[in-house]
Image (cartoon, rainbow, N blue to C red):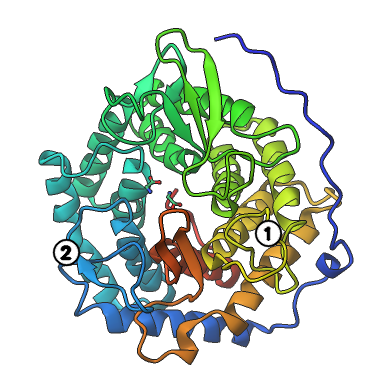
Amino acid sequence: MAAVPVERKTIEPLARAELFSSPPGLEAGDWRKAMDFAVSRIHANIPAFRNAYPAPASVDDVYPAIANTEWTSSFWTGMLHLAGEATGDRAFRETAAGQLPDYRARLDTRTATDTHDLGFLYTLSCVAAWKLHGDGAARATALKAADLLMFRYFEKAGIIQAWGDLGDPAQRGRIIIDCAMNLPLLHWASEETRNPHYREAAVSHLARANEFLVREDWSSFHTYYFDTGTGQPLRGTTAQGYSNDSCWARGQAWAILGNALSYRYVRDPEYLETARGLAHYFLNRLPGDLVPYWDLCFTSGDEERDSSSASIAACGLLELASWLPVSDPLRRSYENAALRLLASLAASYTTASRPDSNGILLHAVYGKPMGDGVDECNIWGDYFYVEALSRVLFAWRPYW
Ligand code: GLY
Ligand code: GLY
């Protein structure tokens, strides 16, 4: 599908170049302590969430228990995998393993599977169980999920529809920036099966997402519509951001990490350049404590922060840095920025101050325009905080 290439502006220099020239003053023991706290929360949650899942967002900083019906179930199962790796404690592994049949049943009964988030759902549950423990049933389930995700791919437009039934006029041909995180499932499926069609869809989708969702100034639209009949790009809009023209903080963070993760599978330098441009835009709009407001159009004032965007961006910066040559002048700055974001979360955003909470990170926002999970714990924020700590503490091998 031919399209006019977007004229990229030059990437903004890092506004906090001096700050990011050094890491925060934390020792290995401090990072360990941060991980120990997170692991203690995960452990304490096992009885309540052995056969249930935390809701996407807490209510008064406490996650209600729900069935495996949301796009977010696997952040809990994924945290169990991470805690198992960090501690070697079999309780985590066994609890995660006990949940895998739920993921299979969800596919078989098509329970809330009309979503591109099959990537999140099946990567952090089943692909992780396969990569960590060689669980063949989990591998088969994840491949089935990849097949189902492929049904959402529109060949002519070269995109994967994000939400809802493929015939729903409100959602047809709509992509969202978050989808960059669902593509590793397709890349993994191509590697496992040696069938290139999953990879081809992922490559096409990311090319279109980077072309149309990422604006000329390296900010991003949350969502974009395409005409699935002709393949024509139509318009950018938001769902969870402040306005159609603003830049939703979490979307920007998803795209930094998603582009850097795709580079694992396809060594396209464009992915790293895109992650870099998005990262500079993100980092340059952070307030003093480096935890963004829920939309990057806010840089001061009383709007809520979204701590989950900081934990996702920390993973993205570490992933990006890991692929850059040591000669890259900004490689260290990205690592230092990631560590500083994380250090700020560890110092001021955890539930250590809230013994009544069953979450890990306070002050996240799910969907401000709809009043969903505003200034609450968000389960993906917790997951990516623990993933980021794993990246800092040991040679963590991504489930992605
Ligand atoms: N809020 C569901 C999704 O973004 O996929
Ligand atoms: N993927 C949905 C969200 O980030 O809220």
**Percent position (x, y) of residue 370?**
41, 54
Please count the marks in the image: 2
Going 65% across and 77% down the picture, which residue do you hit? 343
Q: Is residue 195 visible?
A: no
Task: Locate residue 188 relative to residue 52 in the image: left or right.
Answer: right
Q: Is residue 138 above or below residue 20?
A: above
**Percent position (x, y) of residue 385?**
51, 68
Callout 2, which amino acid?
Gly
Task: Locate residue 114 relative to residue 272 in the image: left or right.
Answer: left
Q: Which residue is mark 2?
A: 98
Report crowding for label 1: few under 14, some 14 to 19, many 20 or more residues within 10 A (C-alpha): many
Q: Quadrant location of residue 199?
A: top left
Going 48% across and 58% down the picture, which residue do you hit? 368
Q: Mark 2 and 1 residues: CB-CB less than 8 Å, in contact?
A: no
Please name whichever residue, 327 or 246, is drawn nearer the observer in this view of the structure. 246
**Percent position (x, y) of residue 124?**
36, 54
Q: Is residue 105 visible?
A: yes
CA distance for labels 2 and 1: 43 Å
Q: Is residue 168 above or below residue 334?
A: above
Callout 1, which amino acid?
Phe
| Mark number, residue 298 | 1
Q: Secondary structure at mark 1?
A: loop
